[in-house]
Amino acid sequence: MTETGSRRWIAIGALVLSLLIALYIVSGCNQGTKAGSTETKVTTKDTGKKVLTKDERMDWWRDARFGMFIHWGLYAVPAGTYHGERVKGIGEWIMNNGKIPVNEYEKYAAQFNPVGFNADEWVRLAKNAGMKYIVITSKHHDGFCLWDSKVTEWDIMDATPFKRDILKELAAACKKQGVKLCFYHSIMDWHHPDAQAPFYPNYNDTKKSNPHFDRYVDNYFKPQLAELLTNYGPIGVLWFDGEWILDWTEPKGKATYDYVRSLQPAILINNRVGKGRKGMEGLSKSDEYAGDFGTPEQQVPATGLPGVDWETCMTMNDTWGFKSYDDNWKSTEQLIQTLVDVASKGGNFLLNVGPTPEGLIPDPSVERLQGMGKWMAVNKESIYGATASPFGRPAWGRCTAQGNKLYLHVFNWPADGRLEAPLAGAEVDKAYLLADKKQAKLATTVSASKVTISLPEKAPDAIDSVVVLVLKK
């Protein structure tokens, strides 16, 4: 080989090496985002648009603090009863708990004709309650789809007499009213033969494996995700569930996380996309698992989760999907104080409604949401964008914070008119009632260990009166 040829091959080798390094870097960027990370990895080709950090993606969600969960599907038709017998458990699990065969369950589709459904009314109800986002079940564990899926006929358009795309109508209503639309989507599928359908009568068997599950993921699960994320505009959150089955693994979760982000880079994804949650506590076991936030279910962490984004999801009664005889309703007072409790610990509150087969949100749910909306109209400043309390849980209520303002949520109005906040060495600018538009100053006394605020004899709100304590900057 000549010297010139040698130099030429050295140059070619250097070029090849640089290309390999570049490919390695790109591959590394496509590995997804660890939970708790403040960086967003590149998951799409360079479009010239700014790549958002995780904090930037989470910004709207952290500000919102309050959202509506909607569990709705064919399970609303039996409403907790099968063959004249009440089935134990939550309404949307009736196919599993009632041991209903696939061909029998499919008959409910012909009865699902929710002519009372009005997307604008649903969104208006959520917005007036103070909710900033809606998460609806695009597909629950029974596999039935509330949109016009081209992958299956097991959907609202092909299997029911209703023949209207629920998600399309909700997307339009949310866009018009300025509410973020989000989708819940089940990984598990009791109806699909390549997923859990063959496990009948125990669709939820966590020890069985379907040898064709990867085929379900590639030919059904992923194509449906693509439909949801390309046909309905920007989606705020993709809220996965059903990840506890044997065939779902953390690598599948991370791959799904990356796939979803490749379609909508700004979207948020809960930790149930992978194996990171810890039972009903919903907490990520470590930052090695996929997902942007934790999902405590039917509970509020006792001390919150400092440094971790989380969202408590909760029902108003005992069930998520509609169950005609579930009348164990939480009071409006309890729901408002739970919202405040969650916000005081730095979390979000996702409160559920389970519409009827006619497409109506039950009256008890409407009444409670209207009550919450009335309270939020006065006190929303203490919830939106709120951060966790700088001190523990006081006997009189809770505290939320924002900038140099502390919002003292007084559940138990002091009989002696003295409200004590454990703030050592605080420098107080002023204090006033949030409900007082004139912001008349309340007398304050500062000691080495606490701030004492003199309150009027009567509480402005019987459920939660908010005192704003402004600290000097």
Image (cartoon, helix red, strand yellow):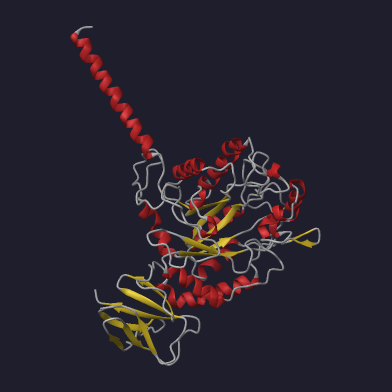
Q: Nearer the viewer, residue 365 or 232?
A: 365
Query: Residue 295: horizontal and vertical position, in percent?
Result: 50, 58
306 in relation to 52, above or below: below
Residue at image x 39%, y 66%?
385
Query: Residue 290: horizontal and vertical position, in percent?
Result: 45, 47
Task: Check the image and name the residue furthest to the top.
Answer: 1
Q: From the viewer's perspective, is 382 left or right of 337?
A: left
Q: Quadrant of the C terminus?
A: bottom left
- How many numbered discs? 0
Residue at image x 36%, y 49%?
52
321 in relation to 462, above or below: above
Query: Which picture quadrant has residue 331?
Result: bottom right
Query: Residue 147: horizontal and vertical position, in percent?
Result: 61, 50
Q: Nearer the viewer, residue 149 or 326?
A: 326
Query: Residue 56: horizontal and vertical position, in percent?
Result: 36, 54
Q: From the viewer's perspective, is 451 left or right of 129?
A: left
Q: Quadrant of the N terminus?
A: top left
Q: From the viewer's perspective, is 176 left or right of 75?
A: left
Task: Check the image and name the residue furthest to the right.
Answer: 84
Q: From the viewer's perspective, is 102 left or right of 187?
A: right
Q: Nearer the viewer, residue 154 or 424?
A: 424
